[in-house]
Image (cartoon, rainbow, N blue to C red):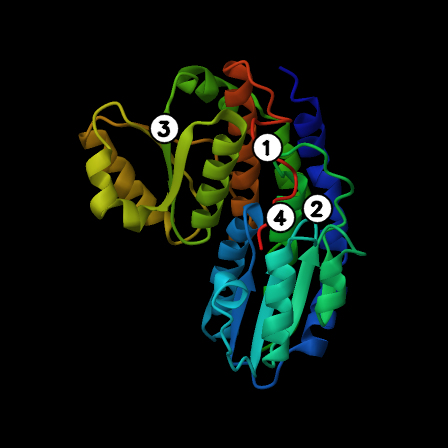
Amino acid sequence: MTGRLMAAEMAEQPQVLARVSARADADARAVRAVLPSPLAGVVFLARGSSDNAAVFGRYLAELRAGRPAGLAAPSLYTRYHASVDWRGYLVVALSQSGATPEIISTCQAVRAGGAVVIGISNEPKSPLADTVDLLLGTDAGPERAVPATKTVTAQLAVLATVTSALRAAPGPDGSLDGLPAAVAAVLDDPGPGRLLAGRWRELDRLVVAGRGLAYAAALETALKVKETTGILAEGISTADLLHGPIAAVYAGAPVLLVDGGGPADADTEELRTLLASRQAQAASLPALSGVPEAVQVIAAVTRGQQLAYELARARNLDPDAPAHLSKVTATT
């Protein structure tokens, strides 16, 4: 049981996020320079943790651009060989390694169909760089632990910048104000995650729920728990949980509720009341106050990393190297 690499890379996040925040204005100008005009819509292309970051981007893009936004299905191009007219669309491709084959081939297909493609990667000289119109780096440095941490929060910050460039009135955005300090504050407070991990170390399943921008944090927290511990954790929207899946939440069932600091938190509070009436084990990790919603959500992702790390150690597992996983998954 070590976790040395994951802990060190989590600790680097304030510095990484400070670098990303410092270039936000320049990155937004670069995005505006390549945007289709008129913009028909925005589609995000990713897998794994990057796919969870894409959910965050999808919400911000539609809010800011006033155009439809969604998530791409790579198999339409790699397996079904779809021919699609992408003129007027912006596609944002996320890949930490910049080397996932299906991401590269799908970028090639949508660009050939007329899309403008922006890549977000931690590797500036990766194959992704050769298949996009603009590459934005996460500037996170080498990441050796299998569970992605600093590259994920850096992707989220870059997505906040990319989507700020979609607004009708360019100018200071403010959505990343205070981000490095907020994440540093979370990292300086590991106790809540450690305490909850102690209570939940014998779990065999976990529901993680959030809504709006916080849905992305719920998805990413569930993935980190699965990766580091093998617990069957499901990230889900609070709205979806209230449909069929609520039948699986019985007395004593563990549910982690993620607050995002935005209007969707009202739904999370309603769910908390319902779970209490069902005697489920509903819990939350501390949320920040007085920060923009995007910052709150990125900080919640860091809280989720802490919980996953502590759960793995409580179960005598090495969070650096989960069983049967590798750093790059070569899906095609």
Q: Amino acid at mark 4?
A: Ala
Q: Is disc 3 in contact with disc 1, using a CB cutoff of under 8 Å?
A: no
Disc 4: which residue: 330
- Percent across and percent down for residue 243 are 22, 48
Report the mark closest to the observer, 3 or 1: 3
- Please tell me which of labels 3 and 4 falls first in the chain: 3
Disc 1: which residue: 186
Quarter of the C terminus within the rendering: bottom right
- Percent across and percent down for residue 190 are 57, 24
Report the mark closest to the observer, 3 or 4: 4
Observer-nearest of 204 and 61: 204
> Would you call the spot at circle 1 few (<14 residues within 10 Å), some (14-19), or many (20 or more)?
some
- Percent across and percent down for residue 202 are 40, 16
> Would you call the spot at circle 3 few (<14 residues within 10 Å), some (14-19), or many (20 or more)?
some
Q: Is residue 167 visible?
A: no
Disc 3: which residue: 205
Q: Amino acid at mark 1?
A: Val
Residue 285 vertical placement versus 242 (above, below): above
Disc 2: which residue: 17
Helix or strand or loop: what does disc 4 sit on?
Answer: loop
